[in-house]
Image (cartoon, rainbow, N blue to C red):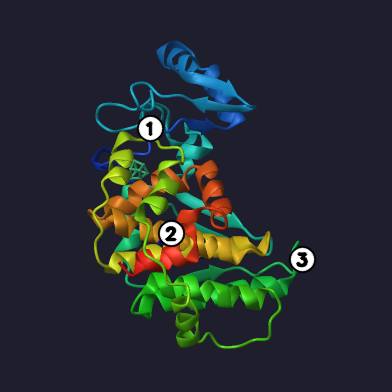
Amino acid sequence: MELRKPDFYDTFRCIAGDCPDSCCKEWDVAVDSEKAAFYRGLPGAQGDRLRQFLKDEDGETYLTLENGRCPMWRADGLCRIQAELGEKALCATCREFPRLRHDYGSFMELGLELSCPETARILLSREDWRWISQGKAEEETDYDPRDMDILLKTRQEAMELVTTAAEPLSALLLYTYHAQSLLDGEPEAAFDPDRAAEAAAALEQAPEADAFLDVFRELEILTPAWRQRLDAPAPRSLQKEDRALLRYLISRYWLQAVSDFDLVCRGKTITALALLCRLLGGDAVETAQLMSKEIENDAENMDALLDGAYTQPGLTDANLLALIGL
Ligand code: SF4
């Protein structure tokens, strides 16, 4: 199978004790069944501790928190399981985080999650990047290869557009409709940004920041810091990190439209997440990392946003465009 990865993928190294946030905070860790059985069978104090904090729920096993942190976290910032039993003893979640894997049948894409502060630093400092590939794509797929070809081509165009457009957020939102029309079988045509902007101008409305922020206030919230940020936005102007954030989000979500042919809800969600980071202000890298931890890492939050792209008053195209113009 063909394997694709961003050219920076192999530069990631966990900074462990120097991490300003840590993946060992605030999250219950899902433990695979093999490691759950191994942990429960461990003798001594470490086994007792694991047995105390492992909980089964809805057919899954989780390592629950103690004072907001993983119970195996040590004061020096290191993981007790890794330090005392070795990396092989880690469950799949901890072994793989923050590495992402998307299997598209004929090829596999690797990536890094923005919710890790070290990944956020690497991802958002890149002015540009490219995919590197090894191996050969499989012939057999569950989807029509034509659809994936369109998605791959339009994803590349979208990533280039947000790198060069004067206002990358509105450009992406408008381009998404063009790409959707190609996916829907409309004849091949070049994206005309001027025509798209004219159509967008007809939607003009006053920006409603609270309606937009309410969408995120109604999601599941993990940390008090995030709620405070949502309640005290401090809008800032465009920075180069916003372009890098858009490239990351496009690379991660665009191809997923092969499952339901709905590119518009993904384009709107990507635009909304990048817009949110701009509206909240603060340090661009820290805000994006926190956004990812709060929203991207919660499947229910992501589903609510994708569904809400068509129904939430705060996420209408007119409101998104008005807020981008702020
Ligand atoms: S969040 Fe990233 S850098 Fe921090 S401890 Fe986890 S993997 Fe390491």
Q: Which amino acid does label 3 sit on?
A: Glu
Spatial separation of the CA atoms under disc 2 and disc 1: 24 Å
In front: label 3 or label 2: 2
Q: Is mark 3 on a helix, strand or loop?
A: loop
Q: Earlier in the sequence, mark 2 or mark 1?
A: 1
Quadrant (top left, top right, bottom left, bottom right) of the N terminus:
bottom right
Looking at the image, is mark 3 or mark 1 nearer the viewer? Answer: 1
The residue where tag 2 is placed is 272
Whether residue 243 appears in this view of the structure is yes
Label 2 secondary element: helix
Image: 32 above or below 56: below
Check whether the beta carbons of the residues at disc 3 and disc 2 lie within 8 A of each other: no
Give x and y (percent) for residue 230. Answer: 32, 45
Disc 2 marks a residue whose amino acid type is Ala
Q: Which amino acid does label 1 sit on?
A: Glu
**Upstream in sequence: badge 3 or badge 2:** 3
Q: Do the residues labelled 3 and 1 touch (CB within 8 Å)?
A: no
Instruction: Classify 211 as above or below 218.
Output: below
Circle 1 sits on which residue?
A: 26
Around disc 1, counting alpha carbons within 10 Å, would you say few (fewer than 14), some (14 to 19), or many (20 or more)? Answer: some
Question: Image point 54% across, 42% down: which residue?
Answer: 300
Q: Distance between the residues labelled 3 and 1?
A: 41 Å
Q: Is residue 112 left or right of residue 118?
A: right
Image quarter of residue 73 = top left
Image spot of residue 267 (x, y percent): 52, 65
Earlier in the chain: of badge 3 and badge 1, it is 1
The picture quadrant where one finds residue 284 is bottom left
